[in-house]
Every structure is written in structure tokens, then in C-alpha cells.
Amino acid sequence: MMGLSRFRTITRGGAPRRPSPSVTAVVLIAALLGCEDDGLDVDDVEELTCAFGATLSGAIDHELALEEIACGYATGHDVDLINIYAPVDGVVDTIAFEILEVSEGAVGTFPARISVALADGRTFDADDCEVDVSTHEPAEGPDGADLHYQVRGLGSCSAPAVDAESTMTVTISEFAFATPTAWRP
């Protein structure tokens, strides 16, 4: 297991903000008029640096809003991209997100794993996930360092996340993500 000293912390945009009354009114009017969401699109994460949006259902029913959140990412890796998201919602403590078999600058479809740790101590692991990395481009690191990248895309899990301590499961909807990373020279 990687030590925490190998993770960098990024906070963009501060803590999640409540929508303004005008935004709330527009969303409410759209819902009343029957406006339907067509699902996630890669454009939804185009301007985000560190975000993970999905709906969790089953042992817990919870919406993870697609917005800037605090995250940490592993450095010094060769072919896996690891990120820990920390939503400030009081329900989910962390989301550990790992893209497997990806290398520096690569885009395309890759296997992935997700681990959702809840505030009540339960953890649900999904090993049968897949992501479509659409953006994997050089970006300035937090300290101006080289070899930093911005990664964005969409993903899904073909099986629910499982709690190893019980028979409970959590289904993770199609998800969108944005994460910074750094590759070893």
C-alpha cells in the first residue's frame, strides 16, 4: 500500500457551494415542465479539475454532485492512475478511484476500480468498472512542476460495489470524473 506522503492534495474552488436561488428556480421549473436529463456527457467535466459525479443506490441512496471537490493523487506510478476524492457531504468520506493499465498521455477505454468509504464506516468495492478517458493532456502542477496531466472522462461499473463485511451492495451509476495526476519521469 502506498504511504500518504506519496499523495498530493488539490483543492479547487473550496468547499461545495449551495446553488443560488435563481439556479434552484431554473432547476425546479425544468423539473415541473418535464425536462429530462440525457445523462452524463464528457462536456460536463470539460472545465473541472478534480471532480467525481455519480448516483449511488442500494445499501445507500445518495447523489454525488459533479463539482469541484478536494482530492489527492498518487505520484511515482507507471501504469495505474490513482485518485482519492473527498466529498464534503457528510455521507461519503472518500472515493478511491483507480484507472488500470493506463500510461502517460493515453486516451481510450481502460479497466477501473472504485472504493466508496461511507461516513458510517462501511466500504463498498467495485472491481468490474471501465472508463473512457477522453482527455489526458499536460497541465501545470500545483507547484509548477513538469509531468502533470489533467485526465477527464466517463465510466461505468458492470456489477455493484460490494461490502466485504456483509451481503450489502451499492450500484454506482454511470459516472463522470476529472482528476489531475503526475507521471514519473
Image (tube, rainbow, N blue to C red):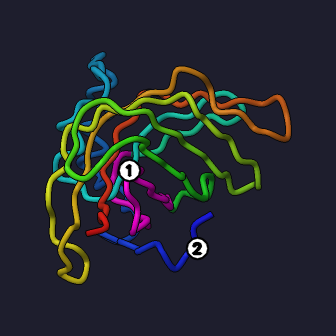
Q: Residue drawn 67% across and 51% down?
A: 118
Q: Nearer the viewer, residue 109 or 29?
A: 109
Residue extending furthest toward the right: 166
In the picture, measured across the screen, residue 67 lies left or right of residue 47, that is right
In the picture, measured across the screen, residue 159 lies left or right of residue 180, that is right
Which is nearer the N-term, disc 2 or disc 1?
Answer: 2
Q: Position of residue 171 (x, y in %)?
A: 59, 27
Q: Position of residue 183 (x, y in %)?
A: 29, 63
Q: Position of residue 69 (x, y in %)?
A: 39, 61
Q: Which residue is mark 1?
A: 79
| Residue 68 visible in the displayed image | yes
Is residue 184 in the magenta section? Answer: no
Q: Residue drawn 17% across and 46% down?
A: 46
The C terminus, quarter of image? bottom left
Q: Which residue is mark 2?
A: 3
Q: Nearer the viewer, residue 20 or 5?
A: 5
Q: How many marks?
A: 2
Q: Name which residue type carries label 2.
A: Gly
Q: Residue drawn 49% across and 59% down?
A: 84
